[in-house]
Amino acid sequence: MIHYNREGGPLHIKSYAFAVRTVNMFLHFSSNDWKLQTIYKQVLKSGTSISANVHESEFAQSPSDFASKLHIALKEANETMNWLNLLHDTNILDDKAYESMVNDCSEVIALLVSSIKTIKKNNQLNH
């Protein structure tokens, strides 16, 4: 097992902060219309899964396992972006909250893409 200590790194910090924001958004919305609970739970699941997968990657068994966990986090971030767009386009999420959440999610996506590219580049150099 390889321990990639990223605890103080930007990806670790930003993905966790985004998970906290997602939970707070869920708590705010979940007291609203019960008919939309399924959507609220989906955004909660995908938004918090990003950080969970980043954390899992820190104890990856290999560089490819590390990259795989970050790929999963990237997929979850993309799904979260979909839910944020849906919540905004249906007027559940106002413009200000939407822009703030989307900006944060976009930052996490950029960090994930950059990390994945670096891993791939480093793996090519080692082979």
Image: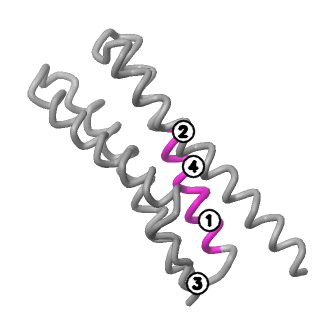
Q: Is residue 79 toward the left or the right of residue 43 in the image?
A: right
Tell me whether circle 4 and circle 2 mark residues in contact (CB < 8 Å). yes
Callout 3: SS: loop
Q: Earlier in the sequence, mark 2 or mark 1?
A: 1
Q: Residues within 10 Å of mark 3 (few under 14, many from 20)?
A: few
Picture coordinates of residue 95 (x, y %)? 38, 12
Question: In the depicted view, which residue is nearer to us: 44 or 114?
Answer: 114
Label 2, secondary structure: give it: helix
User: Which three-letter amino acid code belongs to the residue tagged 2?
Assistant: Asn
Q: Are marks 1 and 3 in contact (CB under 8 Å)?
A: no
- Inspect the magenta stretch and tell me whether residue 56 lies in it: no
Write the residue at 42% across / 57% down.
51
- Dots 2, 1 in contact, CB < 8 A: no
Q: Which residue is mark 1?
A: 68
Between the C-alphas of marks 4 and 1, the distance is 10 Å
Look at the image and tell me in which quarter the C terminus lies: bottom right
The image position of residue 65, as x and y in percent, is: 62, 74
Determine the CA span between mark 2 and mark 1: 15 Å
